[in-house]
């Protein structure tokens, strides 16, 4: 069922149990919003449970919530293309506009006290481990780069096995930053849980405020513009995560001005690498 999904849900909703019917009603009422929700968020807004959402998806013939969202995204994308026929758009302008909206919304979502707390933890850490899978690895690498620029030992890991080993040997003096746009990536959640069980302070960066990853972290930093199954690694979601990284670095240098000296030193040692 990949094309007539919405029509099928309308037809089947009346025969569902109350809990499943509430999930169906929410999906039908806000299909676009559903694409940007985690399983936790959909369960909450529908007055149901994560188990009911999973049952709902499986009853419709899908292996799970992500599989269901992928089918829903494909159907909505087909409908959107049909509406747009004959009305060309400027892709560059749309990218710029969505990026501006994403940055402004992220500014509103950022809790300054959380940025200050996260910065203190990062400054006091003996090591900063950054982890992200696929597109989230880009943010992890950027964070590790920015930490290195201000003289803070850090490394980024996109390999789940290496990250598990790092989390499994984490110390209380370690800070683990786990990045997942969806907040539902299995490896990211497990690594956060493992690092936290070893006493490390875990910071989560995600585009969803309610998700398994956020529940597993000590502190959450939320970016705007959640991705959908068809927009993984989307520019607006990535640029909002990068804003959080830069906000952290700016706060770290404010709390510890000596980091600006390290910034100059790291700039000097690579100055001969360019013509």
Image (cartoon, helix red, strand yellow):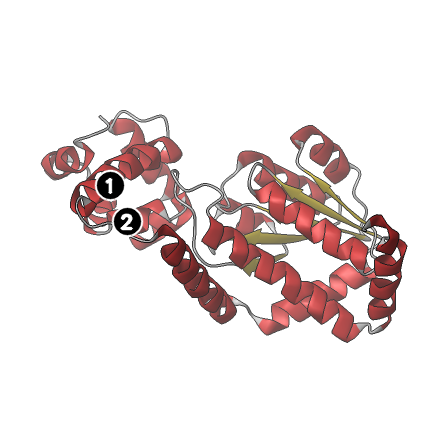
Q: Tell whether 96 sits left or right of 32.
A: right
The residue that mark 2 highlights is: 32
Q: Quadrant of the N terminus?
A: top left
Q: Tell whether 21 sits left or right of 117.
A: left
Residue sitting at x 85%, y 56%: 271
Q: At numbered mark 1, what does the secondary structure look like: helix, strand or loop?
A: helix
The residue lying furthest to the front in this view is: 275
Q: Relative to 255, does residue 34 appear above or below in the rendering? A: above
Question: Looking at the rendering, which quadrant does residue 49 occupy?
Answer: top left
Q: Relative to 242, does residue 56 appear above or below in the rendering? A: above
Mark identifier at residue 55: none
Q: How many marks?
A: 2
Residue sitting at x 45%, y 64%: 100
Task: Please provide percent x and percent y for residue 86.
Answer: 17, 46
Q: How busy is the neighbourhood of tag 2: few (under 14 within 10 Å), some, or many (20 plus)?
A: some
Q: How busy is the neighbourhood of tag 1: few (under 14 within 10 Å), some, or many (20 plus)?
A: some
The residue that mark 1 highlights is: 76
Task: Please provide percent x and percent y for residue 165.
Answer: 75, 33
Find out whether the residues at labels 2 and 1 contact each other: C-beta distance under 8 Å: yes
Residue sitting at x 38%, y 58%: 93
Q: Tell whether 79 sits left or right of 212.
A: left
CA distance for labels 2 and 1: 8 Å
Residue sitting at x 55%, y 45%: 180
Task: Please provide percent x and percent y for residue 103.
Answer: 49, 64
Q: Tell whether 46 sits left or right of 175.
A: left
Residue 48 appearing in the image: no
Task: Please provide percent x and percent y for residue 202.
Answer: 67, 52
* Residue placed most toward the observer, 86 or 77: 86
Of marks 2 and 1, which one's residue comes earlier in the chain?
2
Q: Relative to 212, does residue 78 appear above or below in the rendering? A: above
């Amino acid at each position: 069922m990949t094309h007539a999904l919405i029509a099928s849900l309308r037809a089947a909703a009346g025969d569902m149990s109350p809990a499943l019917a509430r999930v169906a009603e929410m999906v039908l009422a806000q299909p676009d919003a559903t694409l940007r929700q985690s399983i936790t968020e959909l369960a909450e807004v529908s007055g149901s449970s994560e188990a009911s959402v999973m049952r709902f998806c499986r009853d419709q013939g899908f292996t799970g919530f992500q599989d269901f969202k992928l089918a829903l995204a494909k159907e909505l994308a087909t409908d959107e293309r049909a509406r747009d026929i004959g009305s060309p758009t400027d892709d560059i302008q749309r990218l710029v506009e969505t990026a501006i909206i994403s940055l402004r919304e992220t500014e509103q979502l950022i809790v300054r006290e959380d940025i200050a707390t996260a910065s203190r933890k990062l400054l006091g850490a003996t090591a900063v481990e950054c982890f992200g899978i696929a597109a989230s690895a880009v943010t992890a690498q950027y964070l590790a780069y920015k930490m290195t620029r201000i003289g803070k030992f850090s490394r980024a890991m996109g390999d789940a096995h290496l990250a598990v080993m790092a989390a499994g040997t984490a110390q209380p003096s370690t800070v683990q930053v786990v990045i997942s746009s969806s907040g539902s990536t299995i490896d990211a959640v497990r690594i956060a849980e493992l690092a936290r069980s070893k006493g490390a302070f875990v910071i989560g960066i995600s585009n969803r405020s309610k998700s398994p990853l956020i529940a597993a972290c000590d502190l959450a930093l939320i970016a705007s513009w959640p991705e959908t199954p068809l927009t993984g690694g989307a520019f607006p979601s990535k640029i909002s995560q990068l804003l959080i990284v830069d906000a952290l670095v700016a706060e770290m240098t404010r709390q510890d001005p000596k980091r600006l000296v390290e910034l100059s030193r790291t700039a000097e040692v690579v100055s001969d690498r360019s013509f």
